[in-house]
Image (cartoon, rainbow, N blue to C red):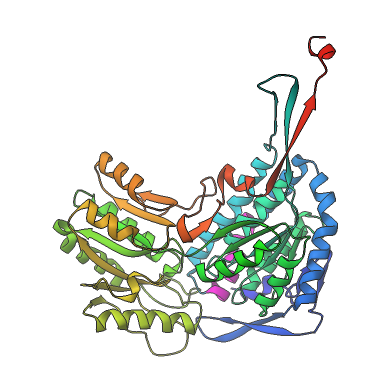
Amino acid sequence: MSDPMDVLAPEHRRLRIGDAWRDAASGATFAVEDPATGTTIAEVADADVGDGLAALDAASAAMGRWAATPPRRRSELLTATHRALTERTEEIARLITLEMGKPLVEARAEVAYGAEFFRWFAEEAVRVEGRYSIAPGGGYRILTVPKPVGPCVFVTPWNFPLAMGARKIAPALAAGCTTITKPAGQTPLTMLLLARIMEEVGIPPGVVNVVTTRRSGAVVSALLADSRTRKLSFTGSTEVGRVLLRQAADNVLRTSMELGGNAALIVCADADLDVAVDGAMVAKMRNIGESCIAANRIYVEEPVREEFTARFAERMGALSVGHGLDDGVDVGALIDEASVATIDGLVADAVDRGARVLVGGKRPAGPGHFYPPTVLVDVPEDARMLSAEIFGPVAPIISFTSDDEVLAKANDTEHGLVGYVFTRDLARALRFTEGLDTGMIGVNRGLISDPSAPFGGVKQSGIGKEGSHEGILEYLDVTYAAIDVPERHRHA
């Protein structure tokens, strides 16, 4: 098998600004590592503030032309992007695994997921509609015209380096906006490859710009302070989201925020345990648990606690850990040493407070940022892992005895991204759906992400929705025109 880095030529590991691939003005670069080995796999351009503003120059210059491009043409280009990503799944997936660590099978799934955003929003591009109506009091007409908001700044995370960019870029382009994406420093290569593919399918210069940098704070702050920027979309931690919201307020920017989660997964005594165990495995272990919608706390009703725990722990213990490019690997490397140290600290804290480890719990020796699938029971309520976002392959199991009790515990968090409930009682499922303070709920399933569904949270888990029809609305302003109709023309 060829080197995964062969898919991205050295000249395309630079900044994508306007119609050029260029070095950072300072000539600076930074290293990208394989988290499974800790070795450097590439050097990419390290942009400064001037480079970021150059990207905004390009996005602003292209804005008028792209907004005026017929919706059908924008749709065709997004469809072509979907096709190209699908045809090149294997090479893209191998690059994702190399820089992010997830197993190859999951990287392939991410390519399919990310590509689907381009297909979905290709269809939405030609369905952006205003309305025309008679004013209720008569005498004039009401016309509403949707318009693209303008140049958009995207800050994307490392855990889904293709899909999180696609989820923002696709609706923006469908609406007629131009974009500047600042990918995470740990995983810039996949976004650069996406920009290259979009260039190849014919996306005009300046519409998709990519700025890689280790100086994220300064570069993004400068972009948000510039009046030409009209939209910010960020996926990441709640802490960083608060900072960006404060900065976005100065220019009253449109914002979409997909922030942290602390998902509760609830298994009721009447659940189909086969379905519940399968669903919990997906909700916990998709993407090695490095997901904002990962099950962070698993609550199991007391009558089935022992059986569910035994079956779930057996499944977790059977997962193989290794380099994501190797055959048969279920759990790849975590993104960096800081992530491993954080997770190790959360487990140690829980154990110190009385929790018991059933599976895993000790990081392996050797190179790479690995942590084994871990299951804990008897986790006390004051354990830090019940309030912190674990973001890794660690599952605390807590028992409950009533719906009111578990709803109170599930909602006792500043976050409100997603919740999961497993029950065969429809009335009970509806009670949890209405009672959980979350933007999304999985009922008898552990996978909820879908480009055709509105993704987003409540409380401090975010603002706005991504995906579905709601996703394109985040990139449109509405102009209202009151059109006078003189009396002599009303019944002509």
Q: Quadrant of the C terminus?
A: top right
Residue drawn 59% across the image and 77% down it: 186
Residue furthest to the bottom in view is 366
Quarter of the image that includes the N terminus? bottom right
Residue 261 vertical position relative to residue 437 in the rendered view, above or below: below
Instruction: Check the image and report above or below for 435 versus 390.
Output: above
State which region is magenta.
86-100
Q: Where residue 248 sits in the image (x, y, percent)?
A: 66, 63
Can residue 167 be seen?
A: yes
Q: Is residue 438 left or right of residue 298?
A: right
Query: Residue 430: where, in percent of width, then height?
Result: 31, 42
| Residue 415, image quadrant | bottom left
- In the image, residue 42 above or below residue 378: below
Q: Nearer the viewer, residue 160 or 226?
A: 226
Q: Which secondary structure dominates the residues rendered in magenta?
A: helix
Q: Report the residue that reaches farthest toward the left.
A: 303
